[in-house]
Amino acid sequence: MRNKSLLAGLLLLAPSLALAAGSIDGEVERQSVNPTAIAMFLVFVCITLFISYWASKRTNTSAEFYTAGGGISGLQNGAAIAGDFMSAASFLGITALIYATGVDGMTLALAAFAGWPMMLILLSERVRNLGKVTFTDVVALRLEQTKTRVIAVLGSVSVVIMYLIAQMVGAGKLIELLFGLPYEVAVIIVAALVMAYVAFGGMLATTWVQIVKALLLLSGITIIGVLVLHSVDYDFNELLQQAVDKHPRGGDILTNGVWISDPIQILTLLVSMMFGTLGLPHILMRLFTVPNMEESRKSAFYASVFIGYFFILLIVAGFGTIVYVMGNPEYTDSAGKLLGGGNMAAIHLANAVGGDLLMGFMSAVAFATILAVVAGLTVAGSAAISHDLYAQVLCKGKPDPDKEIRLTRIVTLVLGLLAVALGIVFQEQNVAVIATLPMVVAASVNLPILLLSLYWSKLTTRGAVAGAIVGFVSAIGLIIIGPKVWVDILGFETALFPYDYPALFTMPAAFLAIWLVSIMDNSERAKQDRECFDRLVQSSETGRIA
């Protein structure tokens, strides 16, 4: 039961780890108000609101709104991508998993990180060279514009909305847990701040908010890691030995199978995280904020460095929680359970090694991570509606610039209000299910059509549309008949589909549908689609659209 609770929790705040967040699902034990954490968070808010004001003076066109005018350096963008990817989920959720299960808790971190070399090799240069604002620009370059953009927007907007629900519910639960604030207050605060960042400062403000958040999170986890290692004279083997001596499972925490014993279940989770990351619209959109393909490649490289460093320190922090927090009467109740729930392991560790000041700092950073992630999602959602649908489909690529930027800001406000409403409506629902969907949809809809448009000469518009529909319907369908909905929500005794994360099955189904329909497509449009491939490859390598 404990493993199931942890697994559900890890699905809440998923943008960065995609499927991660700590067990904030359901009821949480509200903590007393933490003045230090609130004061530090207010400082962060003031800094980021100033950034938004500064960015608003430099955001006058749609290009500047969507992509910061392409003026972000590779290092800056790499830090921003890392800020998008590293979340409260990572910090709280993975340390909680290691605290409970040992090395099995590292599975999520390794799977999420594994997607970045593929991003660097397969997508970073080609996507940057071919697109302008969203990955839909890349797909539509060689395929029929209207159909391709509509089906791609379906995938993008679905991912954004489902992530927003998970993020807002996670925000409410997390802030209720860490700050002692009411759920509804937390949701409204997050939405109001994000609308201010995005509506006025666009991608430029969002980028710098993410950079600041990444620096704070990396600084905090570095301090925790150094303090933990210092206590064992920087001997990691000694840290592991103390953890084994302290943990009730003993040496089992250094072996696999404690968390999930079914290898297929593990594989489906890994595939969902690894390939879902490559199809996330708000991550792909960041590739367009740099001026050229070299900086795009640097972005993916620096992001990999920052994220890899972060995950290494998370491992130290995870085993540190076992040594410092497990069984400590200061942080556990009479039954041995953590005060505040499993997510509080990392926060208690901060208190154990750094006192109230470090605890307050890390609590504030955990809240700040949500703001940065939701801001990135909001920009991606606004771009999908305003750029892909309005500017490119309805206006045939020739929109009125003033109307487009006005519509973008209106969409931002609508998304913010929608996020508040859905966050309140779904606060008592199993948001672990909602958070599973965007990763599976990204892997089953966005990634197949993007990857094959770049690398397969026989792809056709009909094939892309068919594959996207198959991926979308199968992803939602298999989750509905899987354990989390069929059993946990609908109350049936046995699930019709045995696995929680169906990307292992839905992604190949999408690829198969694309292949089958494309090779059978002999239409006049299909001939044009195939003939465009050579020019697309040339453009993807040179950066010049042929």
Image (spheres, rainbow, N blue to C red):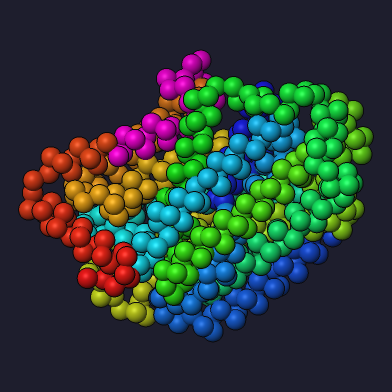
Magenta stretch: includes residue 489 = yes
Residue most extreme to the right: 329
| Left or right: 523, with 501 as reference point | left
User: With respect to residue 316, does 3 lie above or below?
Assistant: above
Q: Can residue 180 be seen in this view?
A: no
Q: Nearer the viewer, residue 391 or 369?
A: 369
Taken as a whole, is the magenta stretch helix, strand or loop? loop
Q: Can residue 302 be seen in this view?
A: yes
| Left or right: 323, with 174 as reference point | right
Magenta stretch: includes residue 287 = no
Name the residue at 88% across, 47% down.
Answer: 233
Estimate the x, y position of residue 341 in percent, counting from the top left. 76, 37
Residue most extreme to the top: 493
Name the residue at 48% across, 74% down.
Answer: 68
Which stretch is magenta?
488-511
Name the residue at 51% across, 60% down.
Answer: 300
Q: Quadrant of the N terminus?
A: top right
